[in-house]
Amino acid sequence: MAAWHGSGSAGQSGNGHVHSAGDEWIETLVRTVAHLAAQLTMTQVRLRALATELEEAGVLDASAVRTRQRTIAEQDTGAYLRENLGEALVEVIDVESLEADIREFLS
């Protein structure tokens, strides 16, 4: 990602500063979060375009979609969230609180 250009040998940035293992971990985390945010944004744009086209074509009922969204959110949010976070992040994130926030937002 643009914010984390690296040049030079491993452990050393282009400006001669030595990176610690913690710096490398932070850089990896930042890149991962940026990559996931980009994927999420692209998915949101695609889904919005698809839903808009289907609704305008009269192919779907927006109210029925919202009802289905609430049902799926209630049933599957926890499983999807845990799957997407992975074991390591589930250990350090308050998943139950995040799950409740997601359900509330989608309701």
Image (spheres, rainbow, N blue to C red):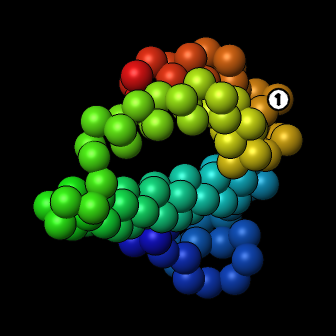
- In the rendered image of this protein, does residue 20 appear above or below residue 91? below
Task: Residue at 63%, 33% (x, y): give it.
Answer: 77
| Residue 52 sits in quarter | bottom left
Query: Is 41 drawn above or below residue 80 in the view shown?
Result: below
**Viewer-proximal residue among 2 and 48:** 48
In the rendering, at what x and y percent does residue 43 appear?
A: 42, 63
Could you say which is closer to the camera, residue 49 or residue 85?
A: 49
The residue located at (69%, 48%) in the rendering is 84
- Decide: is 97 above or below 30: above
Q: Is residue 45 something that shows in the picture?
A: no
* Rendered residue at 47%/28% (across/down): 70
Spot the residue most to the bottom: 8
Residue topped by disc 1: 91
| Residue 59: image location, x then y, percent | 27, 61
Q: What quarter of the picture does the C terminus occupy?
A: top left
Total labels drawn: 1
Q: Position of residue 42 (x, y in %)?
A: 38, 66
**From the viewer's perspective, is 100 left or right of 58?**
right
Residue at x-position 72% and y-position 70%: 11
Crowd tier of the residue under label 1, counting other residues whose Cα lies within 10 Å: few below 14, some 14–19, many 20 or above = few
Viewer-proximal residue, 30 or 64?
64
Q: Would you say residue 89 is visible in this rendering?
A: yes
In the displayed orientation, state which residue is furthest to the left: 56
Residue 27 quadrant: bottom right
Left-right relation of 67 to 60? right
Q: Whole-percent x and y of residue 85?
A: 71, 43
Camera-nearest residue between 32 and 49: 49
Amino acid type of the residue that numbered disc 1 sits on in the rendered structure: Glu
Tell me the element at label 1: loop
Tell me which corner region of the image, top left, top right, bottom left or bottom right, holds residue 79: top right
